[in-house]
């Protein structure tokens, strides 16, 4: 399982931290296999001020069967993120990633993908980060 995480953010936010989070996910899930339907998860994290909100709608989650890829986006509350300390920002990104991804995977019927085992592993990953609420 591999992950790709990128972001769209307002100019008011410097150093939007997704690289470390992405690296840690890829290390944790490196040798894990949950079936043939999803081998790669691609995420766009959006954090923009109100004046840019309309330019950044969230597109619905999609599974591209030919590439065994799940793509999804989610938005962070701009003011909460902007006013948080660095450690709280990372926590916020991770908790929202877990919440949104869990919602997507539990609301879709996905053939040949072990949702339960994946979500258990995702919960274990969050626990190893000492960030779970």
Image (cartoon, rainbow, N blue to C red):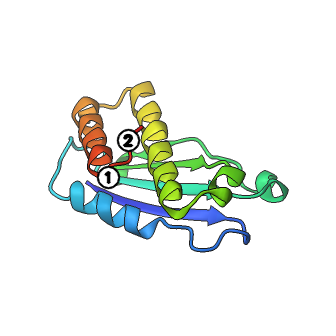
Q: From the viewer's perspective, is 84 left or right of 18?
A: right
Locate residue 114, reporting x and y percent: 23, 33
> Which one is in front, 38 or 91?
91
Task: Place residue 45 in its image quadrant.
Answer: bottom right
Residue in the image at 30% along x and 39% along y = 123
> Which one is in front, 91 or 76?
91
Asked if one can make out residue 104 in the rendered structure from this viewpoint, the answer is yes
Locate residue 132, reporting x and y percent: 38, 41
Residue in the image at 48% along x and 54% along y = 43
The mark found on residue 22 in the picture is none
The quarter of the rendered structure image containing the N terminus is bottom left
Q: Callout 2 environment at 10 Å: few (<14), some (14 to 19), or many (20+)? A: some
Q: From the viewer's perspective, is 32 left or right of 111?
A: left
Q: Secondary structure at mark 2?
A: loop
- Look at the picture and state if 105 lies above or below 57: above
Q: From the viewer's perspective, is 43 left or right of 33?
A: right
Q: Check disc 1 and report the residue beneath it.
A: 129
Locate residue 42, reporting x and y percent: 43, 56
- Look at the picture and state if 132 lies above or below 23: above
The quarter of the rendered structure image containing the C terminus is top left
Are discs 1 and 2 less than 8 Å apart at CB? yes
Locate residue 127, reporting x and y percent: 29, 44
> Which one is in front, 51 or 42?
51
Q: Check disc 2 and report the residue beneath it.
A: 132
Task: Place residue 119 in its image quadrant.
Answer: top left
Q: From the viewer's perspective, is 12 left or right of 72?
A: right
Residue in the image at 28% along x and 61% along y = 26
Q: Secondary structure at mark 1?
A: loop
């Amino acid at each position: 399982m591999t992950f790709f995480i990128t972001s769209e953010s307002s100019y008011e936010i410097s150093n939007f931290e997704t690289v470390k989070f992405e690296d840690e996910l890829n290390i944790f899930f490196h040798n894990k296999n949950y079936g043939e339907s999803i081998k790669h998860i691609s995420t766009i994290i959006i954090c923009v001020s109100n004046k840019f909100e309309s330019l950044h709608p969230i597109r619905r989650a999609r599974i591209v069967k030919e590439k065994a890829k799940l793509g999804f986006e989610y938005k962070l509350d701009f003011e909460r993120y902007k006013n948080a300390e660095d450690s709280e920002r990372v926590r916020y990104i991770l908790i929202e990633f877990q919440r949104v991804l869990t919602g997507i995977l539990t609301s879709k019927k996905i053939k040949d993908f072990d949702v339960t085992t994946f979500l258990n592993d995702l919960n274990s990953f969050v626990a190893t980060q000492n960030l779970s609420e």
